[in-house]
Image (cartoon, helix red, strand yellow):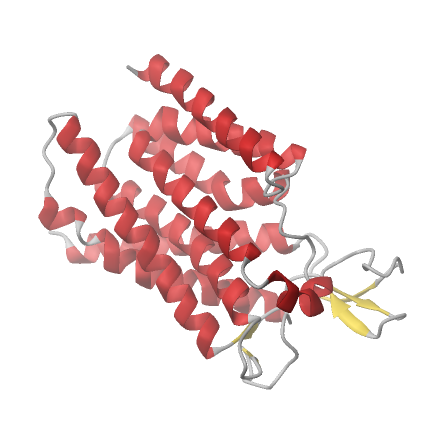
Amino acid sequence: MVPLRFLLGLAFSSFTGIVAYHKNALTASGAVGAILVGTLIVGFGGWAWGMVLIAFFVSSSTLSYYRRADKAAVSDKFAKGHRRDLGQTLANGGLGALLAVGYFLSPNVVLLAAYVGAMATVNSDTWATEIGVLSRRPPRLVTNYRIVPPGTSGAISRDGSLAALGGGLFVGLFAFLLVAGERMALGQPVALAVLWLLIPIAGVSGLIGAFFDSLLGATVQRIYYCPRCDKETEQIVHHCGAQTHPLRGWSWLDNDMVNFISSGAGALVAAELIMLLLP
Protein backbone atom coordinates (compact mmCIF):
# COMPACT_ATOMS: atom_id res chain seq x y z
CA MET A 1 0.00 0.00 0.00
CA VAL A 2 2.78 2.46 0.85
CA PRO A 3 4.64 2.34 -2.52
CA LEU A 4 1.31 2.71 -4.31
CA ARG A 5 0.39 5.63 -2.09
CA PHE A 6 3.67 7.34 -2.93
CA LEU A 7 3.10 6.86 -6.66
CA LEU A 8 -0.46 8.16 -6.48
CA GLY A 9 0.69 11.02 -4.25
CA LEU A 10 3.39 11.92 -6.78
CA ALA A 11 0.87 11.83 -9.65
CA PHE A 12 -1.72 13.89 -7.77
CA SER A 13 0.83 16.41 -6.49
CA SER A 14 2.33 16.78 -9.97
CA PHE A 15 -1.08 17.42 -11.48
CA THR A 16 -1.90 19.98 -8.76
CA GLY A 17 1.49 21.68 -9.09
CA ILE A 18 1.27 21.95 -12.88
CA VAL A 19 -2.28 23.32 -12.79
CA ALA A 20 -1.34 25.82 -10.06
CA TYR A 21 1.67 26.93 -12.11
CA HIS A 22 -0.47 27.60 -15.17
CA LYS A 23 -3.03 29.41 -12.99
CA ASN A 24 -0.19 31.66 -11.71
CA ALA A 25 -0.65 30.42 -8.14
CA LEU A 26 2.87 28.89 -8.10
CA THR A 27 6.19 29.74 -9.69
CA ALA A 28 8.20 26.97 -11.36
CA SER A 29 10.20 26.40 -8.17
CA GLY A 30 6.99 26.58 -6.16
CA ALA A 31 5.51 23.80 -8.27
CA VAL A 32 8.57 21.65 -7.55
CA GLY A 33 8.19 22.37 -3.84
CA ALA A 34 4.48 21.52 -3.93
CA ILE A 35 5.20 18.21 -5.64
CA LEU A 36 7.87 17.33 -3.08
CA VAL A 37 5.81 18.30 -0.04
CA GLY A 38 2.59 16.79 -1.38
CA THR A 39 4.22 13.47 -2.26
CA LEU A 40 5.80 13.12 1.17
CA ILE A 41 2.62 14.04 3.04
CA VAL A 42 0.39 11.69 1.04
CA GLY A 43 2.99 8.91 0.98
CA PHE A 44 3.73 8.94 4.70
CA GLY A 45 0.56 10.42 6.17
CA GLY A 46 -2.18 9.24 3.85
CA TRP A 47 -4.85 10.78 1.67
CA ALA A 48 -6.55 12.64 4.49
CA TRP A 49 -3.30 14.44 5.33
CA GLY A 50 -2.77 15.29 1.67
CA MET A 51 -6.27 16.68 1.22
CA VAL A 52 -5.84 18.92 4.28
CA LEU A 53 -2.80 20.37 2.52
CA ILE A 54 -4.87 20.90 -0.62
CA ALA A 55 -7.64 22.57 1.41
CA PHE A 56 -5.10 25.07 2.74
CA PHE A 57 -3.56 25.73 -0.67
CA VAL A 58 -6.85 26.17 -2.55
CA SER A 59 -8.49 28.39 0.08
CA SER A 60 -5.44 30.63 0.58
CA SER A 61 -4.76 30.93 -3.15
CA THR A 62 -8.40 31.82 -3.80
CA LEU A 63 -8.30 34.53 -1.13
CA SER A 64 -5.15 36.01 -2.69
CA TYR A 65 -7.24 36.86 -5.77
CA TYR A 66 -10.05 38.39 -3.71
CA ARG A 67 -10.12 42.17 -4.30
CA ARG A 68 -6.55 42.07 -5.57
CA ALA A 69 -6.79 45.61 -6.96
CA ASP A 70 -7.59 46.93 -3.47
CA LYS A 71 -4.51 45.15 -2.09
CA ALA A 72 -2.15 46.62 -4.67
CA ALA A 73 -1.38 49.64 -2.50
CA VAL A 74 0.28 47.48 0.18
CA SER A 75 1.77 44.76 -2.03
CA ASP A 76 5.15 46.54 -2.09
CA LYS A 77 5.54 45.85 1.64
CA PHE A 78 5.54 42.07 1.24
CA ALA A 79 8.65 40.12 0.28
CA LYS A 80 6.83 38.10 -2.37
CA GLY A 81 3.73 38.24 -4.49
CA HIS A 82 0.72 35.95 -4.65
CA ARG A 83 2.66 33.29 -6.60
CA ARG A 84 4.29 30.95 -4.09
CA ASP A 85 7.89 29.93 -4.77
CA LEU A 86 9.97 27.05 -3.40
CA GLY A 87 10.75 28.86 -0.17
CA GLN A 88 7.10 29.56 0.54
CA THR A 89 5.94 26.02 -0.21
CA LEU A 90 8.60 24.57 2.09
CA ALA A 91 7.83 27.15 4.77
CA ASN A 92 4.12 26.32 4.68
CA GLY A 93 4.28 22.56 4.16
CA GLY A 94 7.79 21.49 5.20
CA LEU A 95 6.95 20.87 8.84
CA GLY A 96 3.82 19.00 7.79
CA ALA A 97 5.98 16.66 5.69
CA LEU A 98 8.28 16.01 8.66
CA LEU A 99 5.28 15.28 10.89
CA ALA A 100 3.92 12.88 8.26
CA VAL A 101 7.20 10.94 8.38
CA GLY A 102 6.94 10.81 12.18
CA TYR A 103 3.33 9.63 11.98
CA PHE A 104 4.31 6.87 9.55
CA LEU A 105 6.96 5.62 11.98
CA SER A 106 4.73 5.94 15.07
CA PRO A 107 1.03 6.62 14.35
CA ASN A 108 -0.62 8.51 17.19
CA VAL A 109 -3.20 11.22 17.62
CA VAL A 110 -0.68 13.72 19.05
CA LEU A 111 1.26 13.85 15.77
CA LEU A 112 -2.02 14.07 13.86
CA ALA A 113 -3.08 17.03 16.01
CA ALA A 114 0.35 18.63 15.57
CA TYR A 115 -0.02 18.36 11.78
CA VAL A 116 -3.47 19.92 11.91
CA GLY A 117 -2.10 22.69 14.15
CA ALA A 118 0.74 23.43 11.72
CA MET A 119 -1.59 23.60 8.72
CA ALA A 120 -4.14 25.62 10.69
CA THR A 121 -1.43 28.15 11.51
CA VAL A 122 -0.28 28.72 7.93
CA ASN A 123 -3.89 28.91 6.79
CA SER A 124 -4.84 31.31 9.59
CA ASP A 125 -1.86 33.53 8.83
CA THR A 126 -2.71 33.65 5.13
CA TRP A 127 -6.40 34.35 5.72
CA ALA A 128 -5.50 37.05 8.25
CA THR A 129 -3.19 38.77 5.78
CA GLU A 130 -5.52 38.58 2.81
CA ILE A 131 -8.53 39.86 4.77
CA GLY A 132 -6.74 42.09 7.28
CA VAL A 133 -5.21 44.41 4.68
CA LEU A 134 -8.74 45.19 3.47
CA SER A 135 -9.95 46.26 6.92
CA ARG A 136 -11.50 49.72 7.07
CA ARG A 137 -10.07 50.22 10.55
CA PRO A 138 -6.32 50.92 10.68
CA PRO A 139 -4.29 47.98 12.02
CA ARG A 140 -2.26 48.15 15.20
CA LEU A 141 1.15 46.75 16.03
CA VAL A 142 0.84 43.59 18.12
CA THR A 143 3.55 44.67 20.58
CA ASN A 144 2.36 48.14 21.64
CA TYR A 145 -1.01 48.48 19.91
CA ARG A 146 0.19 51.56 18.04
CA ILE A 147 -1.64 52.39 14.79
CA VAL A 148 0.49 51.50 11.76
CA PRO A 149 -0.05 51.50 7.96
CA PRO A 150 -1.81 48.46 6.44
CA GLY A 151 0.58 45.70 5.48
CA THR A 152 3.11 46.49 8.21
CA SER A 153 4.87 43.38 9.55
CA GLY A 154 3.43 42.56 12.95
CA ALA A 155 0.21 44.49 12.43
CA ILE A 156 -3.10 43.02 13.57
CA SER A 157 -6.73 44.03 13.12
CA ARG A 158 -10.15 42.84 14.20
CA ASP A 159 -11.02 41.63 10.71
CA GLY A 160 -7.68 39.90 10.31
CA SER A 161 -7.98 38.18 13.70
CA LEU A 162 -11.47 36.90 12.89
CA ALA A 163 -10.18 35.67 9.55
CA ALA A 164 -7.33 33.87 11.33
CA LEU A 165 -9.81 32.10 13.61
CA GLY A 166 -11.92 31.15 10.60
CA GLY A 167 -8.89 29.84 8.73
CA GLY A 168 -7.96 27.57 11.62
CA LEU A 169 -11.50 26.24 12.07
CA PHE A 170 -11.70 25.63 8.31
CA VAL A 171 -8.64 23.36 8.45
CA GLY A 172 -9.93 21.62 11.57
CA LEU A 173 -13.30 20.86 9.99
CA PHE A 174 -11.66 19.48 6.87
CA ALA A 175 -9.26 17.39 8.94
CA PHE A 176 -12.10 15.94 11.00
CA LEU A 177 -14.19 15.00 7.96
CA LEU A 178 -11.27 13.66 5.93
CA VAL A 179 -9.62 11.59 8.66
CA ALA A 180 -12.97 10.13 9.75
CA GLY A 181 -13.88 9.36 6.14
CA GLU A 182 -10.52 7.74 5.41
CA ARG A 183 -10.72 5.52 8.48
CA MET A 184 -14.26 4.43 7.65
CA ALA A 185 -13.20 3.63 4.09
CA LEU A 186 -10.31 1.51 5.38
CA GLY A 187 -12.44 -0.23 8.01
CA GLN A 188 -10.43 1.27 10.87
CA PRO A 189 -11.80 2.51 14.23
CA VAL A 190 -13.12 6.03 13.69
CA ALA A 191 -13.20 7.36 17.29
CA LEU A 192 -15.39 10.37 16.55
CA ALA A 193 -15.25 11.35 20.23
CA VAL A 194 -11.54 12.07 19.71
CA LEU A 195 -11.46 13.31 16.13
CA TRP A 196 -14.02 16.09 16.62
CA LEU A 197 -11.52 17.75 18.98
CA LEU A 198 -9.44 18.58 15.91
CA ILE A 199 -11.90 21.36 15.04
CA PRO A 200 -11.56 23.55 18.16
CA ILE A 201 -7.88 22.63 18.52
CA ALA A 202 -7.22 23.84 14.97
CA GLY A 203 -9.08 27.08 15.67
CA VAL A 204 -7.09 27.82 18.82
CA SER A 205 -3.69 26.68 17.56
CA GLY A 206 -4.16 28.47 14.24
CA LEU A 207 -5.05 31.73 15.97
CA ILE A 208 -2.15 31.49 18.44
CA GLY A 209 0.26 30.54 15.65
CA ALA A 210 -0.87 33.52 13.56
CA PHE A 211 -0.39 35.89 16.52
CA PHE A 212 3.07 34.42 17.10
CA ASP A 213 3.82 35.10 13.44
CA SER A 214 2.80 38.73 13.98
CA LEU A 215 4.93 38.94 17.11
CA LEU A 216 8.00 37.77 15.20
CA GLY A 217 7.17 40.19 12.39
CA ALA A 218 6.99 43.11 14.81
CA THR A 219 10.20 42.29 16.68
CA VAL A 220 12.92 40.14 15.08
CA GLN A 221 11.92 39.57 11.44
CA ARG A 222 14.29 41.24 8.96
CA ILE A 223 12.74 44.48 7.70
CA TYR A 224 14.26 46.85 5.14
CA TYR A 225 13.86 50.54 4.29
CA CYS A 226 13.51 52.01 0.80
CA PRO A 227 15.06 55.52 0.71
CA ARG A 228 13.47 56.33 -2.62
CA CYS A 229 9.91 55.59 -1.50
CA ASP A 230 10.47 56.32 2.21
CA LYS A 231 8.76 53.03 3.13
CA GLU A 232 9.42 49.92 5.19
CA THR A 233 9.37 46.67 3.25
CA GLU A 234 10.33 42.99 3.39
CA GLN A 235 12.00 43.28 -0.03
CA ILE A 236 15.77 43.47 -0.49
CA VAL A 237 15.18 45.25 -3.80
CA HIS A 238 12.02 47.35 -3.64
CA HIS A 239 9.39 47.22 -6.37
CA CYS A 240 10.59 50.64 -7.54
CA GLY A 241 13.98 49.10 -8.34
CA ALA A 242 15.89 50.76 -5.50
CA GLN A 243 18.23 48.80 -3.25
CA THR A 244 16.83 48.79 0.28
CA HIS A 245 18.76 49.04 3.55
CA PRO A 246 18.40 46.81 6.63
CA LEU A 247 16.24 48.56 9.19
CA ARG A 248 15.78 46.03 11.97
CA GLY A 249 15.60 42.31 12.74
CA TRP A 250 17.85 39.30 12.35
CA SER A 251 19.42 38.87 8.94
CA TRP A 252 18.46 35.18 8.62
CA LEU A 253 14.84 35.61 9.72
CA ASP A 254 12.95 36.40 6.53
CA ASN A 255 9.22 35.95 6.01
CA ASP A 256 9.54 32.31 4.93
CA MET A 257 11.47 31.43 8.08
CA VAL A 258 8.90 33.28 10.20
CA ASN A 259 6.13 31.20 8.61
CA PHE A 260 8.02 27.96 9.24
CA ILE A 261 8.73 28.78 12.89
CA SER A 262 5.14 29.90 13.44
CA SER A 263 3.82 26.65 12.00
CA GLY A 264 5.98 24.90 14.59
CA ALA A 265 4.43 27.01 17.34
CA GLY A 266 0.95 26.08 16.12
CA ALA A 267 1.91 22.41 16.02
CA LEU A 268 3.19 22.54 19.60
CA VAL A 269 0.01 24.25 20.83
CA ALA A 270 -2.16 21.62 19.12
CA ALA A 271 -0.09 18.76 20.52
CA GLU A 272 -0.31 20.18 24.05
CA LEU A 273 -4.06 20.70 23.74
CA ILE A 274 -4.77 17.16 22.57
CA MET A 275 -2.69 15.74 25.44
CA LEU A 276 -4.55 17.91 27.94
CA LEU A 277 -8.00 16.99 26.59
CA LEU A 278 -7.43 13.24 26.24
CA PRO A 279 -6.74 10.79 29.09
Which residue sits furthest bottom? 146
Q: Nearer the viewer, residue 153 or 58?
A: 58
Residue 249 in view here: no
Total count of labels: 0
Quarter of the image with the N terminus is: top left
Seen in the picture, residue 205 relative to 228 is either above or below; the reply is above
Seen in the picture, residue 77 relative to 178 is either above or below; the reply is below
Whether residue 133 sits left or right of residue 125 in the image: it is right
State the residue at coordinates (31%, 58%).
169
The image quadrant that residue 54 belongs to is top left
State the residue at coordinates (76%, 58%).
235
Q: Nearer the viewer, residue 135 or 213?
A: 135
Seen in the picture, residue 231 relative to 37 is either above or below; the reply is below
Percent coordinates x, y for residue 162 in the rendering: 39, 71
Percent coordinates x, y for residue 27 in the rendering: 66, 38
Percent coordinates x, y for residue 267 in the rendering: 37, 51
Percent coordinates x, y for residue 10 in the rendering: 46, 21
The image quadrant that residue 152 belongs to is bottom right
State the residue at coordinates (62%, 38%).
86
Whether residue 3 sits left or right of residue 213 in the image: it is left
Seen in the picture, residue 69 relative to 17 is either above or below; the reply is below
State the residue at coordinates (9%, 49%).
193
The image quadrant that residue 219 belongs to is bottom right
